[in-house]
Image: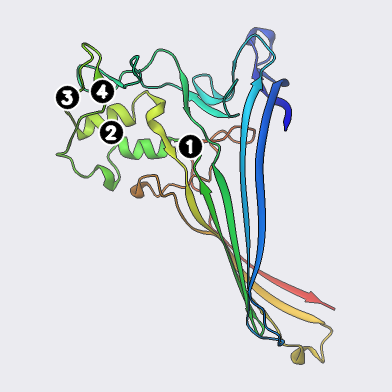
């Protein structure tokens, strides 16, 4: 499908305004959604054991086809040199920022002291759009008890993380414990194009590069497996309600966001990609030392008369 592209467009401050919501072009999108329900066990007797599973799978792709103006780039969220961008031919919302300089063959360029060189031209450094999102919800019931739990799997999607890069750059997590280790950054020397062989120490690698001024080095894969919800319920047997005004009475305890693992980020960071560093709006894929999403618990009572 092709739809209008409406984003916050920056304005010249001399106009008296900084940004405006406007239709700047067109976006083409395609996707698939699959929902599957399975009954693994279905008791023929009341109060018997039942097990059913629901699986939901979604995958979407977008492409900016026209910006309708005298430009092929609009950074509409974040900052001018680090934000979500609408770029013709790219997915909507790609991360645009400072990047590593590359030679004509695409090799990273390294300076004389062994650190990466920043390209003078910013560019696309990541895509926050996930490859797919899958949810698996299981429900078990036996007699008056019910148990349900839901897992969420988000595959791919990049995130620019200040938390991870700061923890690495300051040497505060287990991934930086080997202080005597040396690094040789893959790439070629800026001076003569030879394969880089300059060794740098632990501090220079993490502080000068990961925590340095090149935003591309602070982009991580946001794939995450999450235990989204667990519920345990109990329905009071009807024989106990015979002399009461209730037709049914049930109790449920629940927990939300109980566990997660962002498998492609450093284990020591215990990082949660479920965050929005740009606040309310259409920006996504940024984390500016934000706190992780909360773990929540609940208790509910349901009654009929």
Residue under label 1, please give it: 158
Other-residue count near label 4 (Cα within 10 Å), few / some / many at <14 / 14–19 / ≥20: many
Mark 4 vs 3, N-terminal side: 4
What colouring style does the render use?
rainbow
Please say whether residue 293 is visible from this viewpoint. no
Residue under label 2, please give it: 206
Q: Residue at x 48, y 50 (%)?
A: 224
Please say whether residue 101 is visible from this viewpoint. yes
Dot in front, 1 or 3:
3
Assign the C terminus to one quadrant of the image.
bottom right
Residue 197: which disc? 3
Q: Is residue 277 above or below residue 135?
A: above
Q: Residue at x 22, y 45 (%)?
A: 177
Viewer-side residue, 266 vs 52? 52
Mark 1 vs 4, N-terminal side: 4
Residue 61 horizontal side relative to residue 226, left or right? right
Q: Is residue 248 above or below residue 291?
A: below
Residue under label 4, please give it: 115
């Amino acid at each position: 499908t092709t739809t209008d592209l409406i984003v916050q467009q920056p304005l010249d401050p001399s106009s008296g305004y900084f940004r405006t919501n406007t239709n700047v072009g067109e976006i083409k999108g395609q996707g698939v959604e699959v929902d599957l329900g399975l009954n693994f066990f279905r008791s023929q007797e009341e109060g018997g054991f039942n097990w059913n599973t629901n699986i939901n799978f979604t995958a979407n792709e977008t492409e900016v086809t026209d910006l309708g103006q005298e430009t092929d780039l609009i950074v509409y969220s974040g900052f001018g040199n680090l934000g979500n961008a609408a770029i013709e031919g790219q997915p909507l919302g790609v991360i645009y920022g400072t990047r590593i300089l590359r030679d004509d063959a695409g090799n990273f360029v390294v300076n004389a002291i062994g650190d990466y060189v920043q390209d003078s031209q910013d560019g696309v450094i990541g895509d926050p759009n996930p490859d797919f999102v899958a949810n698996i919800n299981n429900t078990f019931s036996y007699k008056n008890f019910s148990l349900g739990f839901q897992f969420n799997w988000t595959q791919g999607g990049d995130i620019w993380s200040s938390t991870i890069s700061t923890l690495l750059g300051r040497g505060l997590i287990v991934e930086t414990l080997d202080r005597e280790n040396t690094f040789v950054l893959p790439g070629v020397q800026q001076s003569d194009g030879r394969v880089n062989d300059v060794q740098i120490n632990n501090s220079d690698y993490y502080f000068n590069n990961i925590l340095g001024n090149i935003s591309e080095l602070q982009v991580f894969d946001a794939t995450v497996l999450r235990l989204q919800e667990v519920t345990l319920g109990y329905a009071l047997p009807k024989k106990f309600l015979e002399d009461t005004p209730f037709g049914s009475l049930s109790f449920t305890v629940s927990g939300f966001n109980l566990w997660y693992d962002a498998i492609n980020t450093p284990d020591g960071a215990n990082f949660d990609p479920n965050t929005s560093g740009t606040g309310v709006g259409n920006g996504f894929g940024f984390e500016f030392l934000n706190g992780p999403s909360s773990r929540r618990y609940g208790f509910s009572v349901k009654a009929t008369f």
